[in-house]
Image (cartoon, rainbow, N blue to C red):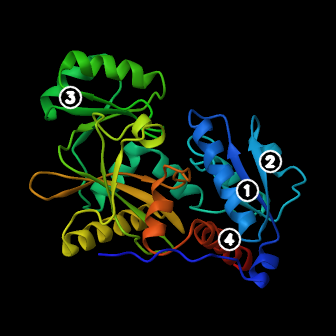
Amino acid sequence: MQHSEPQAYQADPELVRALGRVAVFMGGDSAEREVSLKSGKAVLAALQSAGVDAFAVDVRGCLLETVDEPEFDRVFIALHGRGGEDGTLQAILAQAGIPYTGSEVLASALAMDKLRTKYVFEGCGLPTPKFRTMASVADAKQIAAELRMPLSVKPSREGSSIGIRKVSSVEELIEAYEKAEALDTLVLVEEWVEGPEFTVSLLQDRALPAIGLSTDHEFYDYDAKYLADDTRYRIPCGLAPDDELRLQHLALDAFRVVGCRTWGRVDIMQDADGQFWLLEINTVPGMTDHSLVPMAARAAGISFEELVVRILRDTLEDADA
């Protein structure tokens, strides 16, 4: 299956005027600061290339200062992790009446919390690996008895696979918990799904071509995402057309039940029986040269410049609402 190559893109002059002056928020104080700076710079360059009047804001310290006498009309949020992706910044911008990209306050807060997102998946009948909350090392034996090893241990409210570990014993579970708990007091433990990993990017209520992921690392971790040059991306993803359609529909269902909007990415595993399992939703995915959303958009014939402008264009609907 051949995908069309994106054409050179220039935003419509009337759209550019309507968008006004755009601040690209990047950086922040989360553990994902460096990735966010890379994403933000890429977004800024693409917007400027498309003709949009955009400039960078490296957000540090008090988020309230970002809306103190703003010299911009809207915000493209390229902040990953806490503060920028978890509803905090979204709430501040909404209260100030400043349009911003991506999901709104509640959906952002929910999607950032892997544990509570899984409660929603479970409550809506969407498939997600069995899981437990781990509150102390004393929970280790009971969790190991209730869930099937190996297990994945995750800080519930970090992104970019930060702090995630695969464990195969109670001793490893305790060690992984202590490291995860240092990053987040809320720690999620779930059954590990052995099999291929896929990610589906969403753009304006449409699923883009799925990407199959493989790496020589134990899993698609931080290094595999942002640093390694040997991570393999499959587009087409390797699934039969009907299975890819099923995968895309599952991703759209997950995105909708959490209440997300405009753009994002859903990560999904497939087991040996062909069953898909939802892992998490990213409401401000990476936009670096290693990133998956631009890769999926390109496979759909959408250039990086067109992608960022389309994401930004949805903020005009907020202004008109």
Return the residue at label 1.
93
Of pointers 1 and 2, the one earlier in the residue sequence: 2
Q: Give the label on residue 66, or none.
A: 2
Whether 148 is drawn above or below 117: the answer is: above
Q: Amino acid at mark 3?
A: Ile
- Tell me the quarter of the picture where residue 130 sits: top left
- Percent x, y for residue 131? 25, 40
Query: Which secondary structure, mark 3?
Result: helix
Q: Does residue 173 appear to the left or right of 309 in the view shown?
A: left
Residue under the image location 78 percent in, 82 percent down = 13
| Label 2, label 4: how far apart the Cα atoms are | 18 Å
User: Which-is-in-front pick, marks 4 and 1?
Assistant: 4
Which of the pair 122/19 is nearer the observer?
19
| Label 1, label 2: how far apart the Cα atoms are | 9 Å
Return the residue at label 3.
143
Which of the pair 10/53 is nearer the observer?
10
Return the residue at label 4.
315
Q: Quadrant of the N terminus?
A: bottom left
Q: Amino acid at mark 1?
A: Leu
Q: Are marks 1 and 2 in contact (CB under 8 Å)?
A: yes
Of pointers 1 and 3, the one earlier in the residue sequence: 1
Q: Amino acid at mark 4?
A: Thr
Query: Which secondary structure, mark 1?
Result: helix
| Label 1, label 3: how far apart the Cα atoms are | 40 Å
Q: Are marks 4 and 3 in contact (CB under 8 Å)?
A: no
Q: Are marks 2 and 4 in contact (CB under 8 Å)?
A: no
Q: Amino acid at mark 2?
A: Thr
